[in-house]
Structure formats: C-alpha cells, structure tokens
Image (spheres, rainbow, N blue to C red):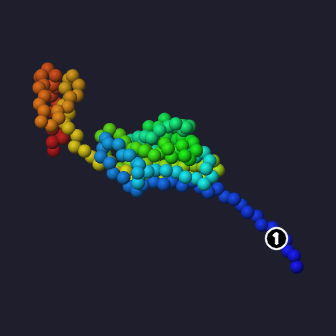
Amino acid sequence: LQTNLTVTITVTNPWPVNAVPGAQTVAEDTKLFLNGTNTVSVSDLDDDVLTVTLTVTNGTVGLSQTNGLTFTTGNGTNATQTFSALQSVVNAALTNLYYLGSTNYNGNDTLVLVTTDQQGGTVTSTVPITVTAVNDPPVVVTNGGPGSIGDRKSTRLNSSHVSESRMPSSALK
C-alpha cells in the first residue's frame, strides 16, 4: 500500500525581542546610564533592519552613538526618537543609553522601547524610572537677573538691584 501525503509548512515571522532592566531610580538633574547589567538591547532572529522608537515624557533619552542609524524622528538626544538599522548597529547605539529628566523634574517617568522588524513584528517594553528630588541651593532674583547663594558664602546686594515682593494676605490664611 502506498500513500501520498502532502505537508504544508507555513513559516511565521519570529517577533523581535527587547531586553530591558527593571525599575530604575536617579536623582533629579543627573544622567541615568543604562549599561552593564542594566543594558537595553534588541534582537531578532531574522537579522533584518529594525525600527526602534524610544520615548520618555519628562526628559530626554541619549544614545551612545548614532553612526549607521537612519532617523525618522529625533537625532539621538530627544524625548522621542525613531531610527532604523541592523540589529548590531542598533545595539551599539543602545550600549550606553542614558535618561536625563527635565531640569528640576522629580517624580515618575517611563522609558518606552518599541521595536519593529521588516515583517511587521512589533514588541513594546517599558522601564519605570523614579526621579528623586534634590535640595537645590536658594536663588536670589535681583533686578540685574538671578544670582545664586551657595553654602557658606555671602553675597553683598546693593539695594538698587533688589526689588521687594510680598505675598498677598490671602496666601497667609
């Protein structure tokens, strides 16, 4: 007895994979470098061109380098940037990725990483970031512009350069 059997094999696109660290914490006005055990990276079995979008709400994301990247949004140091390249080039750019919150920002932010391959496979990953407050030195505003008084320093102010400002009495209640 002889039987013919027809087998159909459908190849599906393996989606890209993002590797991201867990939650991160950084002091305000300080760069948070994602490297070493906290490195961000992408991989795709197809080894084709990947499109990557990095987004944060309250700061900027900076890449290690931009050689070989084709940008459609941003330039390597932006709140949102989208670029394309081969996996090895993308990972070289992500090797020493950093986050820097907006000036004097403290609170929560999230780094969002979206990776898409040429067959349309897309994966999204997030890195929660807590930006802690720091005790900034006081700032004296004079008619000539702002000035700073650091610890254990004195500043002589001429009365012609200082204006008086009072809180409204309603604010004291």
* Horizontal arrangement in the rendering, residue 152 relative to residue 25 (left or right): left
Crowding at dot 1, Cα within 10 Å, few <14 / some 14-19 / many 20+, comes out as few
Farthest residue in the top direction? 160
What SS does tag 1 mark?
A: loop
Asked if 142 appears above or below 48 in the picture, the reply is: above
- Quadrant showing the N terminus: bottom right
Residue 138 visible in the displayed image:
yes
Q: Residue at x 17, y 33 (%)?
A: 149
In-front residue for pair 25/138: 25
In-front residue for pair 52/47: 47
- At which x and y percent is residue 69? 54, 38
Residue 53 visible in the displayed image:
no
- At which x and y percent is residue 170? 18, 40
In-front residue for pair 3/112: 3
- At which x and y percent is residue 89? 54, 43
Task: Kindly identify which residue carries mark 1.
Answer: 5
